[in-house]
Amino acid sequence: MKYFLRTGFCLLVFLTVSCSRDSSPGTEEEQVPLPNFRLIGEDADNIYQYTYNASAESGTEINLTQTLGVDPFYLTLRQVAEVVSFYSFSADNFSLIQQNTLTGQSASYLNFYTVSDERSITWGTNSEDLLFLGYYSPKGSRNFGLRTLDPTDGSFTDLSLDFNIQQAYDPLYFRQRLFITYKDEAGNYKIVVYNTETRNVMITLDYGPGIPNLLIDELGNLGILVGLGNSDFVYYVLDIETLNEINEFTFSLNEFLPPGPLQGDVFDTTLFYTNYLAQPSEIPFGPAYFDFVTNENFIVDILGIVQQVELETQFTLALTALRYYNEAEVFLMGYADASSQIELRGGVLIISKSGQLLSRIELPFVPTYFVKP
């Protein structure tokens, strides 16, 4: 998700940013060690990488627009291992810039694809060494296909996936497997499993009207949550290599999880997910988790936390990003100061699993993506 506001801002290439710890008045502060983390953020003109060191209680930032030429209006961000990829579009061409968020190594593939009347691109993603484009062909149709492209020499292969589909959703890549979710002509939800090494379709999973959410669990298995309606779900766990079923069970959760990659994670027996608040709420989303064993669904009081921060800072907060860090058992939430008309700034809220605000880190830009550890 990208948060844009066209305002001026002083360009900073590298600096140290301090943080402040907040707790509710009269509330005993939880003693939870804060995690190291990395994030991607932006102001009106630049894209940044920020690395936070918990022991030093400070962080450093790198201006990726100045150092690598990352387009501040990039289309899509993807992550494979420690590498984040920025897809952009200009003058009828798609380009890609990659940054290893740990080592700082980078690569760029400018103008790797030129648009034409033959096909309409609906998404782009990548593996460690290949690029993938989901498209409709011919342009104007709903015939769904996949282009696999080697950016080093420009060679490619095209593969037809289905005809006259209703909707394509974001893909998910992990360890030589590309998972492509879409709704077919009849309204059935399907997942194509594509082997990126052999460039062949391994299987197409058909869930009918059930809405699938994909994830990679902490053991490296494929997890598929299928919403059946009326709060009923089935959770399938498949071996990533063979696609053999490892586990299957049902549960009940009164939440809608949109199709495609899950906006959350599963750790052990707990589903951590993005809870979308009923509109017209001033806050669009917040953290939540569901225990498969106890059937307990815990929703963090994000409205209360936002009101607390707004009261203390006199900011108007707009939430921008969310990720759960399992090792530290905390939620990280990015925010923007929506009340500022002069500069685009924001920060990070660090929230405990019990729902208490542990810390707030102010930043001179807005976090839009937390790098998955």
Image: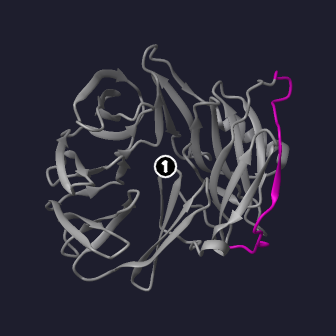
Q: Relative to the observer, which residue lies in front, 72 or 185?
A: 72
For the record, the magenta segment spans: 6-28
Residue 261 visible in the shown view: yes
Main secondary structure of the magenta stretch: loop
Residue 20 coordinates in the image, percent (x, y): 84, 42
Q: Secondary structure at mark 1?
A: loop
Q: Is residue 11 above or below residue 172?
A: below
Q: Residue at x 61, y 66 (%)?
A: 4
Q: Is residue 117 left or right of residue 361?
A: left
Q: Residue at x 32, y 49 (%)?
A: 176
Whether residue 172 is in magenta: the answer is no
Q: Residue at x 42, y 33 (%)?
A: 217
Q: For residue 301, which quarter of the picture? A: top right
Q: Residue furthest bottom?
A: 91
Q: Is residue 13 above or below residue 210?
A: below
Residue 8 coordinates in the image, percent (x, y): 75, 75
Residue 45 visible in the shown view: no
Residue 362 coordinates in the image, percent (x, y): 78, 51
Question: Dot 1 surroundings within 10 Å: few (below 14), some, or many (20 or more)?
Answer: some
> Pointer 1: what residue?
81
Residue 114 coordinates in the image, percent (x, y): 34, 81
- Look at label 1 and name its amino acid: Ala
> Which part of the image, by quadrant, shows the C terminus?
top right
